[in-house]
Image (spheres, rainbow, N blue to C red):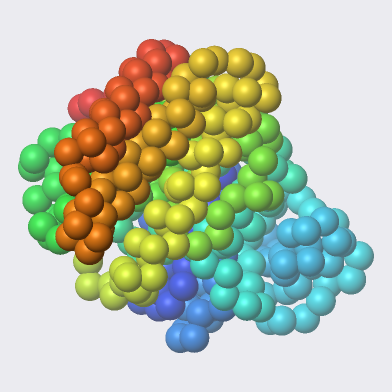
Amino acid sequence: MYRNHTIGVVVPAYNEEGFVGEVIDTMPEYVDRVYVIDDCSTDGTWEEIQRHAEKANEGSVPVHYDEEAVKGEDKVVANDGGTVAGQTQAFDPRVISTQHEENRGVGGAIKTGYLRALEDEIDITAVMGGDGQMDPDILHKFLDPIVEDEADYTKGNRLLYKEYREGMSKWRFFGNSILTFLTKVASGYWKTMDPQNGYAAISHYALDNVGIEDMYEYYGYCNDLLVKLNAKRMRVADVAMPAVYGDEESSINYSTYIRKVSRMLLGNFFWRLKVKYLVLDFHPLALFYYLGVVTSLLGVLGGVWSLYAKFALGNPLFVRASLSIMLFTIGSMFLMFAMLFDMQVNESKEVQIRD
């Protein structure tokens, strides 16, 4: 327990043999429950989880819940693979290990842990990757803003200080910067940076109300969660932390990753406008956004048609090009006004936690 709040930590792991055991061993003592999720690894990750979970749970009966138990069915599986008939859920042992029968992605693994934390009514649930890149000694920095009622959700930020991003390659920094901007637009959290950072903590209230069952399961789950948090008007805090990279190998296919996450963010952007500014409440910025997108797109298409008509058909360029530029300019102004309104609406929902 940390400052009179029960603490849970979700540890997603996929092919993290040689790393996940140390994550379990170095978990701070004030953490009440550790949910270690093996996302159908193909190496010795599951066996390593079982060994270290048994060590952490010495003095109690080490068990892990299978996917059916997570979904609410009363079935518990012992670490040796046997079913413990009729055993009910309890707050002991400390480490609960779950193994997915199919690979669902890091978001799916975290969702499994989040749902277990909701069932256990944990006050604050954090996420620490199974690759050992997240320093357990700074976990309290993510918990304090929630304990002190300054935020409902906290996340790491490796981009705030130059010295903190020294371990980040230029290519990774470039890609992160692009996704940061796209996530700002999609989520409405305009001050939030480094949305790809998976080191995070969330209050029970936010976890229970954000619709975690529908969370995106692929890489990009954290971007998706930010959009859902904003739609429910939750407060988000950025916690400054250094970038840490070890000997682990990334399983991300970047071409697939960028395509999928960008498409997801576009859909989430329009979903957020509808839910937050048209369904749950009304604000004209949603109309500004829609008009801006449509008018700008018409301007671009008009420009393309003008060039085609000029060079392929020999038609005059001036009138068509002028109208296209005017439409694009008006659309851009609508978008700028919409972004400004969006920043003003969400300004009080963002906090920067510095050293």
Counting the numbered discs, the total is 0
- The answer to which of 353 and 176 lies nearer the viewer is 176
* Quarter in which the N terminus is drawn: top right
Q: Is residue 223 left or right of residue 299?
A: right
* Quarter in which the C terminus is drawn: top left
Residue 17 at x, y percent in the picture: 40, 78
Seen in the picture, residue 13 relative to 275 is either above or below; the reply is: below
Residue 203 at x, y percent in the picture: 57, 31
Q: Residue at x 49, y 86 (%)?
A: 42
- The answer to which of 278 and 101 lies nearer the viewer is 278
Seen in the picture, residue 263 relative to 77 is either above or below; the reply is: above
Q: Which residue is outermost to the right?
A: 86
Q: Residue at x 26, y 40 (%)?
A: 320
Q: Residue at x 37, y 42 (%)?
A: 297
Residue 109 at x, y percent in the picture: 56, 62
Q: Is residue 88 left or right of residue 194?
A: right
Q: Residue at x 72, y 69 (%)?
A: 66
Residue 64 at x, y percent in the picture: 68, 66
**Quadrant in which residue 124 is drawn:** top right
Note whether residue 95 is visible. Answer: no
- The answer to which of 167 and 328 lies nearer the viewer is 328
Seen in the picture, residue 54 relative to 129 is either above or below; the reply is: below
**Quadrant in which residue 37 is drawn:** bottom right
Note whether residue 301 is visible. Answer: yes
- The answer to which of 50 and 98 lies nearer the viewer is 98
**Quadrant in which residue 5 is drawn:** top right
Seen in the picture, residue 162 relative to 131 is either above or below; the reply is: above
Q: Is residue 108 left or right of residue 248?
A: right
